[in-house]
Image (tube, rainbow, N blue to C red):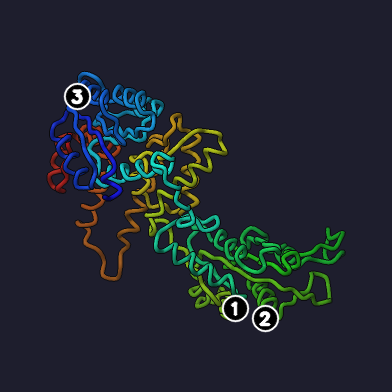
Amino acid sequence: MSGKERHSIFVVDDDKSMREFLEIMLTKEGYKVTLAKSGEEAFRILDKETFDLIITDIRMKDIDGIGVLKKAKAKAPDTIVVLISAFATAQTAVEAMKEGAYDYLPKPFKVNDLKGIVRDALESRRISGGEGEEEPSKERYHFDCLVGDSPQMRKVYDLIKRVSRTKSNILVSGESGTGKELVARAIHKLSDRNDRPFVVINCAGIPESLIESELFGYKKGAFTGATTNKEGLFGVADGGTVFLDEVGELSPTIQVKLLRVIQGRTFTEVGGTEEKSVDVRLISATNKDLEKEVIEKTFREDLYFRINVINIAIPPLRERVGDLPLLAQHFLEKYSRELEKDIKKVSAYAMDLLGQYYFPGNVRELENIIERSVALEASNIVLPESLTLSNFRGKGMKQMRRQHDMGPNGVKLDEVMAEIEKNYIIYALEMSHGSKQKAAELLDISMRSMRYRLDKLGLHSKK
């Protein structure tokens, strides 16, 4: 018997077509399904039976979905309840979550979204002890302080394990916000230098006039204000690891001095005459195309090959969207603890909106969005309203433009414009929970124009 066949699901909805659809879909997934066509009938069934999970419409004529939720929880507190409705509001969702609902989905919803919620909800029940099984290890999607279980991140984890056992210099490349410093820290932690310092040097954050003295230290009297000797960051890191963040920002003069340190493992303090030996493992990071910089003569070729013995490329978040739920939950738990709020999860609809976003700021931007959402959220689940969606709309055109970068052969403008129009209509319908009238208002077009565009683009809404 499969895991799914052990689970019983109770569907409550006064819409016959919706009941039949859910019954067929859930049965095909291997669940045992029971149906009720009203809140009253649901009460009678709940008096006799208990279920692992209940899917109930919120708006019904006699007893609404909140009533079904309270009834189910009163009899069996560990019952999972998912609410669905074409009329859900933020206030309704907040009330539902306070009463113990697991999640809510606005109609029309995507089948895969509901399947995912059911699967995750039953898994959370198993983990919490409802079925007496052990919690699965988080090691499969956590690597030190990195989070992700996508094939791309698994390759990164494997490379980190292999290079940590070497002494070779490493270049970590990737866009801003992808977690390059976390990769460097993981390498240091797994290396035989992990009991020695890990020193971070932000090459872009130190003024050019000061960077040499910061890196290599200085002698008393070397310049105005040098009243004592000071050890540089390379000296502090002796025996450990130096992480050069934004290495592409180094000036040509400092590039020469860094090359000398790498080649000879020695340096001279500013104002000093004696060479000092240093033993460091160098990990550099950049969001620039250093090969291009080398061609353009803005970065030394010999230095590039010295720091890039092994390259680790970190994929942007948009190329590993499968990690988005794991990352969102990770940050949710982090900021719920820090802000002392009892927020359990990101709602399915909010997660769907996140999944459509381009994330130019990558994982760092996602972390900021989740932190802000936790701070603003009044319920125990992150709702779409807490995602400050105006930021999403403001960057939508940038996302679409990147999807249609003009190549040497140009583009078909009519096709590009049709896709942009389609994307905005779909987004407006999602924001309005499927209401064509509200979507038309968001797009500042008439209902007649809305119907024409839906027909032209092959889009169909249930309302």
Give the residue type at disc 2: Gln
Q: Nearer the viewer, residue 34 or 96?
A: 34
Give the residue type at disc 3: Ser
Give the residue type at disc 1: Arg
Check disc 2 and report its element: helix, strand or loop.
helix
User: Which quadrant does the C terminus fall into?
Assistant: top left
> On screen, 186 above or below 275?
above
Instruction: Please give the residue where the numbered disc 1 appears in the rendered image.
Output: 306
Residue that protrudes farthest toward the top in the picture: 62
Check disc 1 and report its element: helix, strand or loop.
helix
Task: Return the disc, 1 or 2, that comes first in the chain's sequence.
Answer: 2
Query: Which of the 4 image quadrants contains residue 454?
Result: top left
Q: Residues within 10 Å of mark 1 (few under 14, many from 20)?
A: some
At which x and y percent is residue 128? 44, 40
At which x and y percent is residue 394? 38, 45
Q: Nearer the viewer, residue 271 or 243?
A: 243
Q: Residues within 10 Å of mark 2 (few under 14, many from 20)?
A: few
Task: Identify the residue shown where x is 29% and y is 36%.
Answer: 105
Between the C-alphas of marks 3 and 2, the distance is: 78 Å
Instruction: Please give the residue where the numbered disc 3 appears in the rendered image.
Output: 38
Residue 445: in sight, yes or no?
yes
The answer to the question of whether label 1 and label 2 lie on touching residues, with beta carbons closer than 8 A, is yes
Task: Identify the residue shown where x is 21% and y is 38%.
Answer: 33
Query: Which of the 4 image quadrants contains residue 214?
Result: bottom right
